[in-house]
Image (cartoon, rainbow, N blue to C red):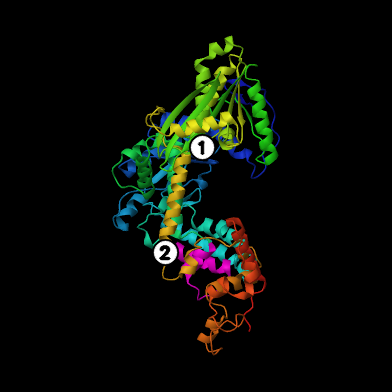
Amino acid sequence: MVEMIIEGNAMERHPVEAGVPQGSPVSPILFAIYTSELIKWVEEYVSEAEVLSFVDGLSWVATGNDVNHVVSILGRCAANSIEWASTRGLQLNTAKTQTALFTRGRGHRKHFRPKLTAKIRVGNESIRFNAQATRCLGVWMDAHLTFKEHHNRCMKKARVVEARLRSLTKTYGDVPESVRAVQVACVQAVALYGSELWWDPREVGRRDDLQLQLNRRPRSILGALPTTPRRALVRESGLTPAPVTLDSRQQRFAARLENASSSNLKEVHSNNSPGAPICRLVRKEHANGRTIEGMGWPAPGEGPAVKTTILDDTAPAKRAAQRWAREKEAKLRAGVWMWWADGGCSDDCRVGAAAVCKHGNEWRPRRSFLGTGHMEVFDAELWAIGLARDVPIEMRETLQVHGVKTVAVFSDSQVAIRRAAHLEPGPGPRLARRINRRAQSHLTHGIATEIHWVPGHSGIPRNEEGDRHANLARNASGSTVVDQPYTSASNRATRLSVGRSAAIVEWEANKCSMQFSSRLIAKARTKRPIPMTSVKALAARFHRLKFGHAPTGVYQKRFGHRDDDKCWWCGGTVAQTQGHLFRHCSRWKDQRRPSGTQRDRQQAGQRADAGMCRSLSFSP
């Protein structure tokens, strides 16, 4: 029999004749519901222990200065767990129970062995600490948390995956773009699993292992010859160097920790000891920002209270939105109060937001200066929508007297409008809750809230006025200065992205300057769409030509196959180099002819690449 109790209300009992199927997503949910009482039971009787629960696994963590003290705490946890299970007709499987001991001691191995001989009593059996690494959630953790065993296992698994994909990356395999996607999704994901925990810039050995493994992937992607410089291949294939990838993954992980559980990291922030690499990075991220924007699920019963309208971003939809906005303006005295919200960010990262409405012939703006370097345009747009909701809150009784039934807010940011329509975790949760709480307060008094999208810079007077005041709000003078704004999630993501791009440029400048000539540096990390999506054999010939491994005139003279290095297509007057073939050769003159606009020049370059890929031939 199964009986569900939700918020103290008992449901009707139902007989259960079969269990859930293997691998069903309902299984971990039912497991979490059923074991929630076990967690409370053990933590009540063993206050020194802490539980870690994920999906269908439970772990008890005890901390102490003495191994015997830790063994005593874990033994009491096991005894209380068995007692709880026995009262419900359950039996724990001791064969799947493991214990691990983590210590800061760096002494000789012989001094560590006596600690591992300690036994924990679990029912009628005694379990010792694992002498080798322990696997938890796919991460192998050794006694000193060096993660060497985890790194070695991941690299071995990645080499196996790479060998199995070798048949797809040969000369007549898939197109280069597909090979690159498979390599990143399969090989790189396996090799870097859990690297956020162990990566340290001082770990030269592991970094070199990953870079060597990465150096093999561009050759299989582009079909280049073995003598092609490896760093040039990494640059041309669009792959990210190993040190930059490791730094980026660890920084994003630290940012997620700050956003998800900033209140639980106070001990990490206040601890002066070096600690693990991820702890040092968390402290660094905490030092860069003031108050971190936390993310969490909405409270029970809390939901969106605004109505949003967004049309497609096409020319007919824009015209319909303009016409609809003007119709709303005509209904100003028919119970609709209209506000126009906009946000802006200057080149020096000064962020401002403004909301305006028109009362008679007078504009009534509200402006806020949100500081420098802590928010993005997305946050400013949400803040502006919130400003448009603050004034109706203050004038709620006046609105009821004048018969206002709807407050309509117009914004030209579709992303901000979509964010205001839900309260789930993501960027801007505080601002979205602020908007919806004010809308809910209005709704209880019979005033609805609508947020509508309107095309920006489309000639609508009120929208242009909102944009003008948003630009004025970026200056502290004449605007309400928000004291110490928190660092938003979108701002941190932008900062990490900019830092990653700068690290890639620095790596390429240091590693590739001796292997790339000036003709290739100008298009660094720009994947050519035509060769990357062409047949692998033609794409391989294209990249071999670009890297100087094609039978051009210079190449054939170098190895004694020709007496001169002149281009046979241009009358034998110019040396046939890669730069000449790509830029000046008459063979591909029509495909290379540029037009006026930048888009036309880009398309001309793609036509030249396509012509070269279709007709690569170097016989005179």
Please say whether residue 2 is visible from this viewpoint: no
> x and y percent of residue 461 in the render?
58, 30
* Residue lying at 53% horizontally and 43% vertically, measured from the top left: 93
Type of the residue with mark 2: Asp
Magenta span includes 441: no
Report the side of 324 relative to 548 (left or right): right
- Nearest to viewer (mark 2 / mark 1): 1
x, y percentage for residue 435?
53, 26
Callout 1 environment at 10 Å: few (<14), some (14 to 19), or many (20+)?
Answer: many
Q: CA distance from mark 2 to mark 1?
A: 39 Å
Residue 137 visible from this viewpoint: yes
Q: Dot 2, how many residues are within 10 Å of its Cα: few (below 14), some (14-19), or many (20+)? A: few
Q: Secondary structure at mark 1?
A: helix
Q: Nearer the viewer, residue 87 or 328?
A: 328
Residue nearest the viewer, comparing 279 with 140: 279
Q: Which residue is mark 2?
A: 208
Image: 417 above or below 169: above
Quarter where residue 17 is shown: top right
Residue corresponding to mark 1: 378
Q: Which residues are magenta?
A: 209-237
578 to 177, vertically: above or below = below
Disc on the earlier residue, 2 or 1: 2
| Magenta run includes residue 217 | yes
User: Callout 1, which amino acid?
Assistant: Phe
